[in-house]
Amino acid sequence: MPKYYLTTPIYYVNARPHIGHTYTTIVADTIARYRRMRGDDVVFLTGTDEHGQKVERAAKSAGVTPLQYADRISAEYRRLWDQLDLRYDRFIRTTEWRHERAVHNLLLKARDAGHIYKGFYEGLYCVSDEFYVDEPTPEGNCPICGRALEKIREENYYFKLSAFTDRLLKHYEDHPEFIQPEARRNEVLSFVRSGLRDLSVSRTSIKWGIPWPDDEKHVIYVWYDALTSYMSGVGYGDDEIQYEKVWPADLHLIGKEIIRFHAVYWPAFLMAADEPLPRQVVAHGWWTFEGEKMSKSRGNIRLAQPAASVLGVDALRYFLLREMVFGQDGSFSLDSLVGRYNSDLANGLGNLASRVLTMLEQNFGGLIPEPPAAAPNPFADEWREAARAYQQSFDAFAFSQGLQEIWKLVASADKYLADTKPWSLAADPARRDELASVLYNSAELLRIVAVLAYPVLPHSADKIWAQLGLRGSISSHRLENLSWGGLRPSDPIQKGDAVFPRVQKEEAIERMEQMEEQIRAEGAPKPAEPAKPGPAATPAPAAGLPAAAGDGKISIDDFMKVELRVGEIKSAERIAGADKILRLMVDIGTEVRQIVAGIAQFYEPEKLVGRRVIVVVNLAPRKLRGVESNGMVVAATVGPEGRPVLAGFHEDAPVGSRLK
Ligand code: MSP
C-alpha cells in the first residue's frame, strides 16, 4: 500500500480557531479520506505552534503563563477538530519534549555540517509574523501582514541560506510539482532568483522558545522550531522506525501567506541536515469576509461552529470546497452558504435520494428491484467519465471542479426520472419491468454519487449508503473497485430521514448569527456536545454555549440583567432583499434606536408607527442581513407557524419606563 503523509500548518495558539483555519483542516481531511479511498496508507498530521513572542504577549495579557495559555488554545483546536469529525492521525504540539529533541537534532546536524554561524542582526522585525523584514512595504510596514515593525539589534546564530540558492533552484526545476499552484511557484522562483540572504535562526529578545542547544541566552527561531514539527510529529529523533516509514511528507498543505517559509527555508533547512525533502507544498487562497482577509487582527473572523450546528458539518465542508476555486481567494457569507445548501444539497442530492428511496418503498416494498436482464444501462459511459474527471480534479486539488463532475450525475439522474416518469410507469402493471429498471438505475447512480462524494460529505454519504441498504462503511470502499451493479436485487433499503432537509434561509442565517454572537460573548469555550452531522431541528448547542442552570430557575438578579423598557415605534420600513424583517426606529426615552425585527410577514410597516412596545435595550448590537440591530422588541410566538404578536400595554405606559 503506498503511503501518503500530509500535514496542515500547525496553528498559532495566540488566538482561537476560525473558519480560515477550519478550511485548511477540512481540505486536509478531505484529501486524507480521498487518498484512503484510492488505497493509500494515509498519515494526517496537524497540531499547534506554541512558542514565540505572540504567544508570550497573549498569555501575559490574559494573566497566565505561556504554557497555560497554549494548553488552553491547543485543547480548543483539538476539541473543534473532534466536533467537526476531522480525523487527523497525529497531533503535535511544539511544547512537547519529543518535538524539542527533534529540533535540536535537526539543528545540530546542520551546524555540524557547517551551515550555521554566529553574527549580529540589526534591523526590522515583525512580531506578529515572527519575521525579520528585509523589504518593508513603502509605508515601512510588514510585507506579510501590513502591521508596524519593530527595530531590533541582537547577536544571533545565522543559517547560510544564501549558499542554497542554486540547489533550491535546481530542485524547483527538477520537480515542477514541488510548489503548487503555478502562481505560487512563480512567486517563489522570482524570490529565490533575486538572491537569498542568510537567515537569523536564533533570538535573544524572546524567552518563550526552545533553548539553543549549548547557548541558553538564545532561543531557536520559531519558524525553524515550527517547521520541524512535520518531522517530530512522525517520530523524528524519537521513533526512527516510524520516521523512516513516513517521512518525507507527500504534501504540506498551507495558506498562501506562508509559502516562503515552506518552499524556501524549509527545503534549505532539510538540505543542510541532509534529510529528504517533502514532495509537494500546496498553497490555497484566503477566505475573505466583506472584501478583506479574514483574520483576528482585522476583527472580521467567522467561526465554524454555527454553520456546523445549524446546517451540519457536511454542509460546511461542501460549501468551503465547492465555493472556493482552490488556490484563489473566496468570499465567505452566510447568505451564499445557505443558498448553496438549499440548491445543491437539499434540492439536489438530498431530494434525489428521498425521491428514489420513496419510490422504492412505494413500488417494491422497500426492496431493491431486479432489473430485466436485457435492460440497457443508460449511465454506462457517463458515470465512468464522471468518476474519471472527478479523480483527475481531486488529484489536482481542484475540489470545486470535482464536485461539479459529481453533481452532473445528480442532474442526469433528475433528468432521467423526469423523462422516464416512474410514477406513470407505476400506474401500469404491464410496465413493471421498465419501472424496475428505472428505479434500479437511479438507485445505483445514487450509490455511485455517494461513493464519489464521500471524501467531502462523509456523514451524509454514509447515511445514503445505509439508506440504500448497503452494509459496512462507505469509507472502506475503494475507488478502483467502483463498478456498476453494486446494489443487489431483493436487498432491503432503510429509508430514513431526509439527508439534507430544506431550511428557511433567513431563519437559518439568524440562528447562525445568534450562535456566533453567543460563542464570542462566552470567550474561551468549555467542552461541548459534538456538532450534529446533519441539520438540527432546533439549534444544537455550539461550543461555548452556556448550559441551562440547575433546575432551570433564575434569580431576580439574573432577571434584572435584562433591561426592558417601554418604546414607541417612530418609523418602520421593509428591507430590500429580506422579506421577513423590518427596520424599526424606536424611541426608548433616552434615544431613538434602530432595531431589526422578524415580523415583516405579519405586520404592515405603516400600521406600526406610534405603537408602544417592549424593548430589550441592553442586548449586544448584532447585524441581521447586514443591518445593525440595537435591541429587540418583545413578541409572543403563536401557533404552529410561529406568528409573532407584539407585546404591549392596556394602559398608558410612558416611553422609557423600565419593566420589572
Ligand atoms: N504557525 C504558523 C504555521 C506554521 S507551519 C510550520 C501559522 N499559523 S496560523 O495560525 O496563523 O495559521 C495559518 C494558516 O491558517 C494559514 O496558512 C491557512 O492555512 C489558515 N488560515 C488562516 N486564515 C485564513 C483565511 N482567512 N483563509 C484561509 N485560510 C486561512 O501561520
Image (cartoon, rainbow, N blue to C red):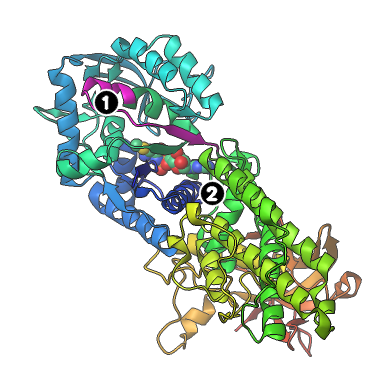
Q: Secondary structure at mark 1?
A: helix
**Residue 269 colored in magenta in the image:** yes
Does the rendering let one see residue 580?
no
Q: Secondary structure at mark 2?
A: loop
* Residues rendered magenta in the picture: 267-285
**Ligand 1 near label 2 (Cβ, under 8 Å)?**
yes
Picture coordinates of residue 613, whole percent (x, y): 75, 78
The mark found on residue 357 in the picture is none
The reply, left or right, for residue 629 in relation to residue 612 is left
Picture coordinates of residue 608, whole percent (x, y): 85, 74
**Residue 273 colored in magenta in the image:** yes
Q: Nearer the viewer, residue 325 or 367?
A: 367
**Residue placed under numbered mark 1 in the picture:** 270
Question: Does 650 appear above or below 9?
Answer: below
Kindly identify the residue that appears in the image at 65 percent across and 40 percent down.
Answer: 291
**Residue placed under numbered mark 2 in the picture:** 301
Q: Nearer the viewer, mark 1 or mark 2?
A: 1
